[in-house]
């Protein structure tokens, strides 16, 4: 596991981003940009952590800097507009209309900086019947149809933490949208624009391939019955004798042949190409896996093309030899965390700083961004 510190700044070095403090997908998208080298200044509100945990442990604020601005106080909006005037990107995650009421909406910001990329992160989007409603990850992926695919047959859908909605359907799409709009803004005739990133849109978009398979008749609109959703006995997870699990993804015939041989299925095993025998095959595979521990099965499949891997916990994953060799996880300031991704050959990125503490960087940002009017009250101590 690598230990990182000050290092190369990545391909977005020189890009300035203003992030209006929020929770969920907005901060994670801003972290992605910060990991890639952008100078991300988070505008925190007085009164402590928005997330509700000690800010020193909020890893989504790594590689950022923080200033304190009370947007509801006199002059608060003006300070944000001053930042926006000097920035390339602004990210906010309020409900539709809130930024406008606070005086920092797209029209106000673009009037000060016509080339600004204004990224808006919401669950339901900026318009539509549900735009004004509250919501969370689970509701967005439920409505998009994505949640209906996850889980076993005959039971309720399985909640995939907030990874599929907030971070895959939200943060990643916001980051891609912002970078695409930034590229446009930097062309000779380019202008700034608003990026409307909605979790429900991104979660729906993630299932594009599945919709194609559904239209072709090769996907059933019932979870736990298809090739990639756990319905297939050679694409799923099985318990070992010590209560752990092994993940199997032996889809291709040549990979399945090696899997079957090393698992010891035997010639009497049901035909994998007969869906009518899949439950029998699943029972046979489960029986075999239950005979040994996870460590023993890991050794059996180590170095093979059987497409079998141990299911590791969050604390176990950083110590896997492959992830350790690639420095997929890093230790910065005693906090083990995923390293920035993806990787770049000419402009490598790194974890440069720990989580930004609210208000800790106000003076430095005021000086570097030439903002003499920015309140330099120092670090917030009210949380």
Image (cartoon, rainbow, N blue to C red):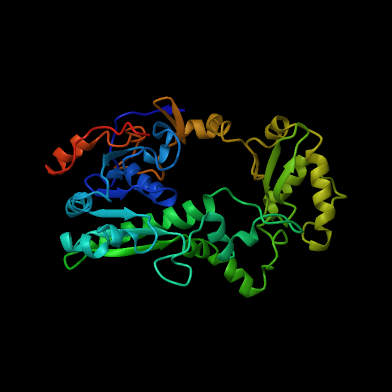
The residue lying furthest to the right in this view is: 268
120 or 102, which lies in front? 102
- Residue 174 lies in quadrant: bottom left
- Residue 4 lies in quadrant: top left
Q: Residue at x 85, y 50 (%)?
A: 269
- Residue 363 lies in quadrant: top left
The residue lying furthest to the top in this view is: 334
Indicate left or right for 375 with 8 as reference: left
How many tags in the picture? 0
Is residue 186 visible from the viewing direction of this image? no
Q: Residue at x 72, y 55 (%)?
A: 152
Percent position (x, y) of residue 313?
61, 35
Percent position (x, y) of residue 132?
44, 65
66 or 244, which lies in front? 66
Q: Can you say which quadrant of the picture contains the C terminus?
A: top left
177 or 57, which lies in front? 57
253 or 217, which lies in front? 217
Q: Residue at x 71, y 50 (%)?
A: 256
Indicate left or right for 366 with 283 as reference: left
Is residue 74 visible from the viewing direction of this image? yes
Percent position (x, y) of residue 41?
27, 44
Percent position (x, y) of residue 92?
34, 54
């Amino acid at each position: 596991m690598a230990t990182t510190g000050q290092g190369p700044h990545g391909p977005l070095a020189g890009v300035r981003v203003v992030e209006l403090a929020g929770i969920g997908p907005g901060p994670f998208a801003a972290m992605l940009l910060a990991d890639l080298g952008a100078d991300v200044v988070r505008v925190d509100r007085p009164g402590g952590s928005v997330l509700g945990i000690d800010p020193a442990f909020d890893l989504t604020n790594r590689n950022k800097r923080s200033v304190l601005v009370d947007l509801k106080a006199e002059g608060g909006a003006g300070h944000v507009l001053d930042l926006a005037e000097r920035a390339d990107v602004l990210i906010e995650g309020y409900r539709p209309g809130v930024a406008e009421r606070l005086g920092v909406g797209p029209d106000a910001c673009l009037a000060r900086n016509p080339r600004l990329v204004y990224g808006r992160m919401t669950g339901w989007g900026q318009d539509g019947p549900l735009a004004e409603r509250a919501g969370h990850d689970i509701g967005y992926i439920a409505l998009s149809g994505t949640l209906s695919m996850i889980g076993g047959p005959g039971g309720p859908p399985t909640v995939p933490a907030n990874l599929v909605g907030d971070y895959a359907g939200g943060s990643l799409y916001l980051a891609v949208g912002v970078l695409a709009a930034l590229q446009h803004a930097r062309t000779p005739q380019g202008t700034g624009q608003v990026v409307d990133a909605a979790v429900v849109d991104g979660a729906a978009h993630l299932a594009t391939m599945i919709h194609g398979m559904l239209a072709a008749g090769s996907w059933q609109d019932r979870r736990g019955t298809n090739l990639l959703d756990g319905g297939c006995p050679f694409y799923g997870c099985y318990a070992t004798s010590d209560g752990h699990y092994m993940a199997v993804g032996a889809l291709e015939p040549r990979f399945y042949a090696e899997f079957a041989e090393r698992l010891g299925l035997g010639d009497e095993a049901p035909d994998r190409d007969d869906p009518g025998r899949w439950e029998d095959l699943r029972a046979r595979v489960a029986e075999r896996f239950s005979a040994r521990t996870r460590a023993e099965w890991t050794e059996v499949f180590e170095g093979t093309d059987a497409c079998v891997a141990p299911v590791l916990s969050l604390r176990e994953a950083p110590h896997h030899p492959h992830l350790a060799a690639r420095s997929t996880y890093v230790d910065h300031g005693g906090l083990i965390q995923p390293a920035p991704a993806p990787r770049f050959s000419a402009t490598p990125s790194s974890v440069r700083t720990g989580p930004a503490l609210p208000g800790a960087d106000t003076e430095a940002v005021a000086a570097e961004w030439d903002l003499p009017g920015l309140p330099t009250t120092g670090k917030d101590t009210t949380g």
